[in-house]
Amino acid sequence: MGIDELTDGVALVTGGSNGIGAAVAERLARSGTKVVLADLDEATGEDLAIRIGATFVRCDVRDPQDLAAAVEVAESTYGGLDLVHLNAGVTTGCGIGEDFDVELYRRAMAINLDGVVFGVHAALPALLRRGGGQIVATASMAGIVAPPFDPIYVANKHAVVGLVRSLASEYASQDITVNALCPSFAETNIIEDIRPFLEETRFPILEVGQVVDAFFRIIEAGRTGECWYVVPGRESEPFKFRNAPGPRVP
């Protein structure tokens, strides 16, 4: 399924009220896709939905029933589901040493990892009824490399990358592609806690439009099991994982 096939198609975007999700939703709507925005930020999400001609549904991705309801809205409103962008995410807000906070840990893991697992679980039956479709999960460069801060965020983003790669082979025969979008630090609310560090170290921050461009390159490529990095100054492409060493036969 490429861009042309998404014209008059149906997409569900979690974390769709702000940042990367909102920008992806807006461009999808411009391309003719019918969009369901799913987010906890009702005021912003409803305003965006009106502006781009989408449908907003309040959704807490930590709740599998909320995600099932969002999929049901897509099917009941627009007749099906073709594309799912599982984008909702947060930073952790704590470390793993003396500053460890179990509630912040659980919140981050629930949104960043459970939200993808529950989203895939909710969407698969609808995609199968459609005869196939695409799933794109927003991971992070922190899902490919291991920066020395926010180790819990790194852990859940690595888990999303592993999940995507595993699911891809399982559902390829049913015409469902599963890929990961792995941006570096982008100009969104999620970087506010670390913005002073980024500015002090002069770490380049991505424009959201660059991340959206990469999202659409994933859609156009139509492949599966890929993790597309998005970093300043480089053209986005799939990260090439090395094969792990296998067992030696005596």
Image (cartoon, helix red, strand yellow):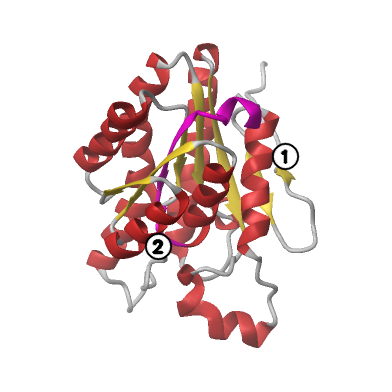
Residue 180 appears at what percent x and percent y? 56, 41
Measured in 3D between alpha carbons, the distance from the residue under mark 1 to the one under mark 2, in whole angstroms, is 26 Å
Amino acid at pointer 1: Lys
Q: Is residue 144 magenta?
A: no
Residue at 68% from the left image edge and 57% from the top image edge:
210
Residue 247 appears at what percent x and percent y? 62, 23
Using the rendered view, name the quadrant where residue 142 is placed: bottom right
Question: Element under label 2?
Answer: loop
Q: Which mark is residue 90?
A: 2
The reply to whether callout 1 and callout 2 are in contact (CB within 8 Å) is no
Residue 93 appears at what percent x and percent y? 37, 73
Residues packed near mark 1 inside 10 Å, few (<14), some (14 to 19) or many (20 plus): few
Q: Can residue 144 be seen in the rendering of this structure?
A: no
Q: Which one is in front, 170 or 2?
A: 2
Q: Can residue 132 be seen in the rendering of this structure?
A: yes
Q: Which one is in front, 181 or 143?
A: 181
42 horizontally vs 20: left or right: left
Using the rendered view, name the quadrant where residue 109 is placed: bottom left
Residue 63 appears at what percent x and percent y? 22, 45
Residue at 67% from the left image edge and 49% from the top image edge:
213
Residue at 64% from the left image edge and 32% from the top image edge:
3
